[in-house]
Image (spheres, rainbow, N blue to C red):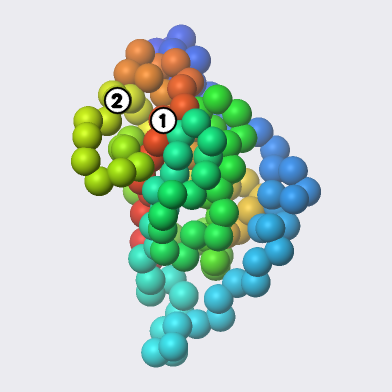
Amino acid sequence: MSESATSKGKSTEQPSASAAEAAGVGVEFVPATTAGLPPTAQTFFAVINGGTGAVVRGFGVVSAARVAVGQYQVVFSHDVTGSAYVGTIGLTGSVGTSPSGEIAVVGRSGVANGVFVQTWTSAGVPADRAFHLAVLS
């Protein structure tokens, strides 16, 4: 990790998933689409409230939780380990001006159908920010 990332309080380590988080909240993975395609031939998305970590809307999203300040777990309906994750800071509604900030997304350690999201202020301080997340394969 670079010195500038360290000095901004960013970490490359995720907190360990709890037993409930690792269980994927009891969701069975989707075996295939109705067209017989693998589940990775889909696009899923979630819009998450920054303060509570609650799902505002989405497709294929099962749950979301705020793990700590600026840290979230978003769980989807199938294994997303081979997927691409795209996140952006954004409002939960459809109009307005979003606060500035930074976001990082990566697969959730120990949760095959989960994505770990971190958000910061533009100064690099962990902060709760609403965000939009897409999972693509």
| 115 lies left or right of 23 | left
Query: What residue is rendered at 46% in x and 75% in y?
Result: 39
Few, some or many residues within 10 Å of mark 1 (<14, 14–19, 20+): many
x and y percent of residue 127 in the render?
Answer: 46, 22
x and y percent of residue 130 in the render?
Answer: 40, 36
Q: Could you tell me which quadrant the C terminus lies in?
A: bottom left
Q: Which of 99 and 11 is in front in this view?
A: 99
User: On screen, 70 above or below 74?
Assistant: above
Three-letter code, disc 2: Pro
Outermost residue on the top side: it is 7
Can you tell which mark lies on residue 129? Answer: 1
Few, some or many residues within 10 Å of mark 2 (<14, 14–19, 20+): few
x and y percent of residue 122 in the render?
Answer: 32, 18
Q: Is mark 2 on a helix, strand or loop?
A: loop
Q: Do the residues labelled 1 and 2 touch (CB within 8 Å)?
A: yes
Query: What residue is rendered at 48% in x and 49% in y?
Result: 55
Can residue 72 be seen here? The reply is no
Three-letter code, disc 1: Arg
Q: What element carries label 1?
A: loop
Which residue position holds label 2? 99
Q: Which of 62 and 81 is in front in this view?
A: 62
x and y percent of residue 41 in the render?
Answer: 38, 74
Can residue 69 be seen here? The reply is yes
Q: Nearer the viewer, residue 123 or 56?
A: 56
| 21 lies left or right of 43 | right
| 98 lies left or right of 130 | left
For the image shown, how many numbered marks are present on the structure? 2
Query: What residue is rendered at 62% in x and 46% in y?
Result: 109
Query: What residue is rendered at 35% in x and 28% in y?
Result: 102
Whole-number angstrom distance, CA of label 1 to CA of label 2? 8 Å
Can you tell which mark lies on residue 63? Answer: none
